[in-house]
Image (cartoon, rainbow, N blue to C red):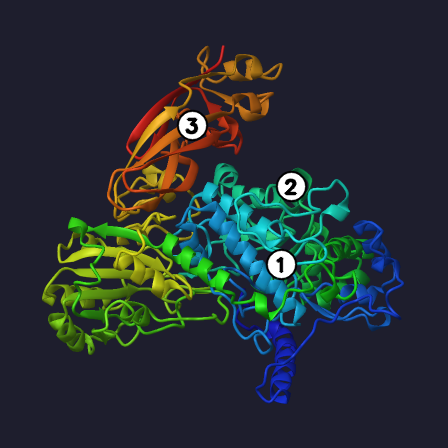
Amino acid sequence: MSRPFMSIQLRERILFRVLQLIVVVNVIAFSNSKPVLNKPDFPCKPPHFDSYPFCNTSLSISTRAKSLISLLTLQEKIQQLSDNASAIPRLGIPAYEWWSESLHGIASNGPGVNFNGTVSSVTSFPQVLVSAASFNRSLWSNIGSAVAVEARAMYNLGQAGLTFWAPNINIFRDPRWGRGQETPGEDPMVVSAYAVEFVKSFQGENWKSDDGGIGFGFREKRVLKGFGEESDRGDELMLSACCKHLIAYDLEKWGNFSRYSFNAMITEQDTEDTFQPPFRSCIEQGKASCIMCSYNQVNGVPACLRGDLFQKARNEWGFKGYITSDCDAVATIFEYQNYTKTHEDSAAGVLKAGMDINCGTCMLRHTQSAIDKGKVQEKDIDRALLNLFSVQLRLGLFNGDPRKGKYGKLGPDDVCTSEHKKLALDAARQGIVLLKNDKKFLPLNKNAVSSLAIIGPLVNNISQMGGGYTGIPCSPKSLLRGLEAYVSKTHYASGCHDVPCNSDAGFHEAVRIAKKADFVIVVAGLDLTQETEDRDRVSLLLPGQQMSLVTSVARTSKRPVILVLTGGGPLDVSFAEADSQISSILWIGYPGEAGAKALAEIIFGDFNPGGRLPMTWYPESFTKVPMNDMNMRADSSRQYPGRSYRFYTGTQVYGFGHGLSYTNYSYKFLSAPSELTISASLKAGSDKNILQQTGSRLDYVHIDEVTSCTSLRFHVQISVTNAGDVDGSHVVMLFARVPKVSQGTPEKQLIGFDRVHTVAKGSKEISFGVDPCEQLSIANKHGRRILPLGNHVLMVGELRHSLTIETY
């Protein structure tokens, strides 16, 4: 969430942040480089400030919040509308920083987190895209839980807040997007599932302590004592997670387009089945307590002014929480987009639209003037404060000393634990994807490798293992160190000075050690110099002269080489896929602090890879497609190939869900219906609408005309057999191909996935629940869900099963 480039209007805001940094620097200097032993400041301190009604825990959340608001002056209210909310000394309320980050571990990006204290490092899990490649819901849940424990521990030590702006659940729409690495990929179902698991766990669902002790469970069935009650007192939060960025945000800077002013033109059809589902799931099922609106415009209106989206979230999806802007997104409405005439118009507009807090200072500086000019009323501020204070109350912020609460015993011993480090390792293992393995070249026999050459600019670099939004890792290790643990005689050459690889000066040394080594591993790909916030790629090829480095080494190596690819964005490595001198290709993405060990274990056979790509890998020719074209569907009339595996009609390097193993798997449908009838399930009066489709032939029914979708649900049971000699965990993906009864019907769509462990020569049975109204429906061009009638095809691997849905 970096801020826009400085303009004249932004100088005051930049100065404001600089002053904050000066304070931090002074604190660090005063500490003489020793850890600062902090403790959190908190409201409702006895004996002078604990008698206010908002401190009374026997009252409802709404009553306490309204009581607090009633005690504030207008100026005090306005001072709460920034991420750096001001203190209210007369009520004993300290300042609060809303902005902390926790994408895949506590990150140093937000001002709410600092590592200059008792806790100087945290567990760094793989970047989200890598964890998504595991297709393992329980893993995602456990990561969310572990990050939550470390976050709450840091809060108890005064080193973090309670409100964290993660996860990023935008769709990885375009392979050039610099922040695609932060997302769970291109499929709305997968992104939705990740959002639900991470948010529920991060906000405390896995917490299983009694009031007198602490405990934390990594398990599939998660129970949180006291949650799920009818009253708002049952809505307590361990921490607050934020679904971002609402909506259709997936462009940083491409050509003349910038995220600060880009107008994302999206169809109702794409909104319904691509851009919106992750946010709906994050709120309806994940119960997220925060939404962040994005910089960009959506169909001509700035996202933070889209009151219709905010109202849909609250009224249709049941959202109970606060809505924040991305950082300085309110200021950009006037300064970059020229959508409003003044800053006052921007501040007033977002408040009236339903936004609650501004990351930045635009509302802080211009709301009073907006009130004076009659552009907004105090009641609009009160509405925003009710949402803000309600979340803080649910977090227990006004319940007295947090160290005496149910999470109060969490501390430094709960950070960087052996359990969390093992989880980070397991996440990296499960997320790494084997893309190619000719003649079963991998795994290597560690007892038969006499020497190993390891080549590449990121081989001996630990700073890029986590990707964007990373903190200070507990136990970082370079890829070189991880591989050296298996082969004592290793030789290293960077080949390229850095990832941009603008010179071949290091090629000679790389070729020299490759000629002498028994086996060769080349590490190539991307880092944050190529893809990050505010930076999109222009090419899908390996940067600079990296391709030449790979081929030069492969030509001179005694044996075919192993290619390891880093980075989040898809790469066109067609040259390597076709080269017999490159036997194996592994994608490790940004694997986190344990990535080196995970990679070494996979290469030398101590772990059987099972990750699957959560995004399509396109050829370089895809860069001819304008990045600003938001359409998901293909359009042959203008030679537009579409986007994602659901709609893309062009060639691909690797497909969504691609991933190999050291063993082979086969499937068998054990149970699945062949026919569904929805004759009596339609609402009265719907027959006329149906018959208008194509005369007497019925092609589909509208989902909102089906009275009981529950009665249509069924289960698909599948047997998975490990036909090889190696145990392994395997991702089973169930797809559906629906009848093409409407323009823009997907080629196929994922309707279920699971990761199962199988022993060699063994079988496992798994069951997928299918709700036809949800999973077999599609969006028509008006954005309305329809259930196609006719022959549906269920697909797992190469196996097919026909299902006819009809009505009478």
Residue 729 x/y as whole percent: 36, 45
Gap in Å between the C-alphas at discs 3 and 2? Answer: 33 Å
Q: Who comes first in sequence, dot 3 or dot 2? A: 2
Quadrant of the rendered image containing residue 111: bottom right
Give the residue number, with chain letter if any, for mark 2: 312
* Numbered circle sitting on residue 325: 1
Quadrant of the rendered image containing residue 392: bottom right
Drawn side of residue 441 relative to residue 86, left or right: left
Total numbered labels: 3
SS for dot 2: helix
Three-letter amino acid code at the position of disc 2: Lys
Q: Considering depth in this image, is 191 or 489 the residue closer to the camera?
A: 489
Residue 112 x/y as whole percent: 62, 69
Gap in Å between the C-alphas at discs 3 and 1? Answer: 42 Å
Residue 307 x/y as whole percent: 66, 47
Quadrant of the rendered image containing residue 636: top left
The residue depicted at 39 percent of the width and 48 percent of the height is: 614
**Label 3 packing within 10 angstroms: few (<14), some (14-19), many (20+):** some
Three-letter amino acid code at the position of disc 3: Val
Three-letter amino acid code at the position of disc 1: Ser
SS for dot 3: strand
* Numbered circle sitting on residue 777: none
Q: Who comes first in sequence, dot 1 or dot 2? A: 2
Against 715, residue 316 (above or below) is below
